Amino acid sequence: MPPVTIRPLRPDDGPHAARVFFDAVREGTRAHYTEAQRRAWAGEPPGPDSWRDRLWGVEGFAAEEEGRLVGFMTIAGTGYIDMAFVAPAALGRGVGWRLYRAVEGRARELGASVLTTEASRMARPFFERQGLSVIAEQVVVIRGVVLTNYWMRKVL
C-alpha cells in the first residue's frame, strides 16, 4: 500500500476534490442512501473547474497517495467540519482518520473548544469513533429529495 501524505488543501485541488466528492457520494454511500438521494446530493459529474472557487479561502487538509488526491476534510470557523470525503478505493486504510487528526489539531491551534459536523449516515460511525456524539438527527431536503444526517459534537 503506497504511503498517504496529508497536506494543506489548496484551491487548485478543486477538480480532484470534486471528483473525490462525487465518487464518495455516488459510489461510497450506496449502502446508506437510495439512488435518488445520491443523485440529489451529487448531481452530475463535476466539470474540471467546478470546485476551484469553492475551495478558495477554505481551510482544510488533503490526503495524497502517489500524487493523487484520495480524500479531503475542511474546517470552517474554529470548529465546524464542513466537508469530509474519502475516495471509495481508499476507504478502510486510515485516510479519514489521518485527515480528522489534522483537522482536530488545527481546530485546537485556532482555540476551538468544540468540534461539530453534520455527518451522513455513512460518516456517523466514523465520527463516533473520533469521539463525536450525535446531538440530533436531521432531515434535509436537497433538490426536493429528503435525506437524513446527524448534527454531531465533541468537546475538545
Image: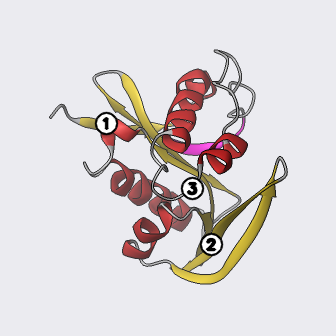
Distance from Cα at disc 1 to Cα at disc 2 = 29 Å
Name the secondary structure under disc 1.
strand
Mark 1 residue type: Thr
Residue at figure coordinates x 42%, y 78% from the top left: 131
Task: Say the numbered circle drawn on residue 5.
Answer: 1
Between 146 and 12, the residue placed more toward the observer is: 146
Residue 24 percent location from the top left of the image: 49, 41
Residue at which label 2 appears:
150
Magenta region includes residue 60: yes
Residue at figure coordinates x 62%, y 72% from the top left: 150
Residue 26 percent location from the top left of the image: 54, 39
Question: Can you tell which of label 3 and label 1 is closer to the viewer?
Answer: 3
Magenta region includes residue 43: no
Question: Can you tell which of label 1 and label 2 is closer to the viewer?
Answer: 2
Q: Is residue 70 above or below residue 121?
A: above
Mark 3 residue type: Tyr
Task: Say the numbered circle drawn on residue 141.
Answer: none
Asked where in the image residue 57 lies, by quadrant, the reply is: top right
Q: Is residue 152 left or right of residue 123?
A: right
